[in-house]
Image (spheres, rainbow, N blue to C red):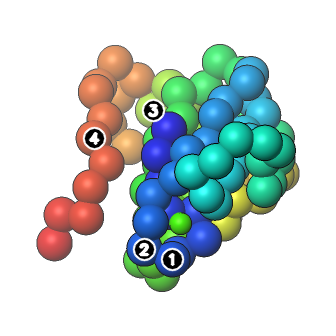
C-alpha cells in the first residue's frame, strides 16, 4: 500500500505480511524503515491521514469496527469506532 508515512509530501510503499507492516520512507530496495505488528492477519487494512497532521497511518477493520492508529505503531489503537455494517464497502478520503 502507499502512503506518506513521514509527512514529507511524498508517498512511498509499505508491505504487509500477515499482521506485520514493513514501512519504507523512500522508493528504494533494502530494509524497511519501520516494522510494526498491528491488528490481526485477517483484518482489512486502510491507509489515511486520520488526524489531519500530514502523515498517513494505518487503520484495520474487523467487521464493522475500525481500529485507527494516528502513527505507525504496534499495540493498541488510538481510536476504536464501530461504523456501518460488516458487509459494507469502505472508502477513505478527505471529504470536507
Ligand atoms: Ca513520505
Ligand atoms: Ca496523520
Q: Is residue 69 above or below residue 96?
A: above
Crowding near pointer 1: few (<14 within 10 Å), some, many (20+)? Answer: few
Q: Are marks 3 and 2 in contact (CB under 8 Å)?
A: no
Query: Which image quadrant: the C terminus?
Result: bottom left
Asked whether the viewer can see residue 68, the reply is no
What's the distance in space between the residues labelled 3 and 1, CA to CA?
Answer: 32 Å
Q: Which residue corresponds to mark 2? A: 9
Ligand 1 under 8 Å from disc 1 Cβ: yes
What's the distance in space between the residues labelled 3 and 2, CA to CA?
Answer: 31 Å
Left/right placement of residue 25 relative to residue 44 reads right
Q: Are marks 2 and 4 in contact (CB under 8 Å)?
A: no
**Nearer-N-terminus badge (4/3):** 3
Q: Residue drawn at (73%, 24%), measured in percent from left and top?
A: 17
Q: Secondary structure at mark 1?
A: loop
Q: Which residue corresponds to mark 1? A: 8
Ligand 2 under 8 Å from disc 3 Cβ: no
Left/right placement of residue 43 relative to residue 2 reads right
What's the distance in space between the residues labelled 2 and 4, CA to CA?
Answer: 22 Å
Q: Is residue 46 above or below residue 73?
A: above
Which of the numbered marks, if any, corresponds to residue 91?
A: 4
Front-lying residue, 7 or 10? 10
Q: Secondary structure at mark 4?
A: loop
**Nearer-N-terminus badge (1/4):** 1
Ligand 1 under 8 Å from disc 2 Cβ: yes
Q: Are marks 1 and 2 in contact (CB under 8 Å)?
A: yes
Q: Secondary structure at mark 3?
A: loop
Amino acid at each position: 500500500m502507499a502512503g506518506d508515512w513521514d509527512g514529507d509530501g511524498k508517498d512511498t510503499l509499505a508491505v504487509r505480511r500477515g499482521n506485520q507492516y514493513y514501512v519504507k520512507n523512500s522508493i528504494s530496495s533494502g530494509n524497511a524503515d519501520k516494522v510494526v505488528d498491528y491488528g490481526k492477519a485477517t483484518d482489512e487494512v486502510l491507509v489515511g491521514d486520520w488526524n489531519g497532521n500530514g502523515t498517513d497511518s494505518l487503520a484495520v477493520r474487523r467487521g464493522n469496527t475500525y481500529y485507527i492508529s494516528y502513527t505507525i505503531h504496534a499495540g493498541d489503537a488510538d481510536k476504536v469506532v464501530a461504523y456501518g455494517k460488516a458487509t459494507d464497502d469502505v472508502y477513505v478520503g478527505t471529504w470536507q
